Amino acid sequence: MDSILVKGNGALNGVIPIAGAKNACLALMPATLLSEEPLTLTNAPRLSDIATMTQLLQSLGAEVAGLQEGKVLALSSLGPINHVADYEIVRKMRASNLVLGPLLAREGHAVVSLPGGCAIGARPMDLHIHGLEALGAEIELKDGYLHAKAKGGKLRGAQMTLRMASVGATENIMMAATLAKGTTVINNAAREPEIVDLAQCLRKMGAQIDGEGSSRIEIQGVDRLGGATHQVVTDRIELGTYMLAPAICGGEVELLGGRMHLVAAFAEKLDQAGVSVTETEAGLKVSRKGGRIRAVDVTTEPFPGFPTDLQAQMMALLCTAEGTSVLEEKIFENRFMHAPELLRMGAQIEVHGGTATVKGVEKLRGARVMATDLRASVSLILAGLAAEGETVVSRVYHLDRGYERVEEKFRGIGAHIERIKA
Ligand code: EPZ
């Protein structure tokens, strides 16, 4: 397993291109199952999670080709479609569950393995199941697989209210509803930019969808969908992650493709902490306002609130802030695994349930640390960039799931970072 060596190297300056959003692309790719026409996705990120989704779709009978070194994905599902999503692939990536809605809508039946838990939580699928059952699906769990079929062979539109604004459940239900008979209304729908991106792509394919980005999405089912070409939206989590590099080390960095509306709540917190974020023609320019970072309190919420996927990275910044910060993680039940690793670097953090209290210290010290999940891994790199001495982050396969060319991008702004091949 590879590791990454990071050495504090002072202020960081330069430009970083931000890639297409992993979490948008992982929802856009299964949409190919809804149509026999070709779907082309541009600005696709080159990540191991995308390779996993490619493998899954190919196992279902779809054709997926990565063009221009994987920045363009050409997908088509002419059929016949295999409707079993195997545990061996699904267990590697929870987002595999996003083939359930499209398979049900296209084939009238699907057998999809439950993804199993992951480091950050149990991550059940009850909201996906209840939503699809409201559309007329009969779903039962057998041997770890969800066996789903549409009563009468076709899904029917329905009104529903999600108990929680689940991103994945909203995506699965929205895709299934595009081919259901009649009207579907999803209340308390997730509002993330990735949902908006998926709805815009489905509309290009001929779907009739209104309200995406609000908590009420209405879908009129149609008989069939066509093909489309769609550009994947910028990755707001990669964007927020790299915004923290100049915040934690000093200097000024411009993030190409960044737009303020994608990270408004996060940028607001950075502003309170003493970091200036300005929107330029090409992206977002980030630099410290001067002086030490100030402590701020953070509570993670569904979009447009502070994103849970930036909580670990923000904690790394607050470890060296002046004062004490309180971080509340409201989305996942176990998303502070980066805290014990940051303690090894001299941070002062106390975790009680879903609350972490961080007392800022002047300087962190480099150490050997271990990545536990995708976002925790990059928070350790950020901490290492600002620490005295060397930090070695092990198990960086987590990192490669969600950050393309991470060493290259950090090196591009002057960071001392290298990959140590196992
Ligand atoms: C998506 O996961 C993202 N993944 C996650 O990003 C992100 O953290 C999460 O949304 C929240 O924003 C992708 O888009 C591929 P949820 P998802 O359904 O859809 C509970 C990353 O680092 N829940 O909104 O799985 C669930 O357990 C990843 O890129 C149920 O209880 O998230 C969690 O506590 C990590 N029942 C909360 O809701 C359900 O049926 C939010 O989950 C579904 C979810």
Image: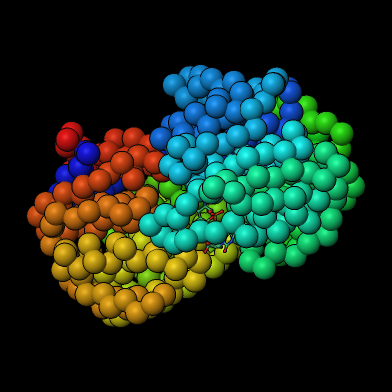
Image position of 11 (left or right of 301): left
Front in this rendered view, residue 111 or 379: 111
The residue under the point 17% across, 44% down is: 5
Q: Indicate whether 167 appears above or below 43.
A: below
Does residue 313 show up? yes
Does residue 40 show up? no
Image position of 24 (left or right of 93): right
**Tally of numbered discs:** 0
The residue under the point 74% across, 33% down is: 107
Q: Residue furthest front?
A: 143
**Residue 385: % across, % down:** 22, 53
Task: Give the colour scheme of this rendering.
Answer: rainbow
Quarter of the image for residue 14 reads top left
Q: Indicate whether 396 appears above or below 315.
A: above
The residue under the point 54% across, 47% down is: 143
Q: Residue furthest left?
A: 389
Front in this rendered view, residue 280 or 366: 366
Q: Residue furthest right?
A: 182
The residue under the point 26% across, 55% down is: 380
Q: Indicate whether 249 appears above or below 5.
A: below
Q: Can you say which quadrant of the picture contains the N terminus?
A: top left
Front in this rendered view, residue 401 or 67: 401
**Residue 350: % across, % down:** 28, 78
**Residue 366: % across, % down:** 13, 57
Image position of 233 (left or right of 186): left
Front in this rendered view, residue 184 or 207: 184
Q: Can you say which quadrant of the picture contains the C terminus?
A: top left
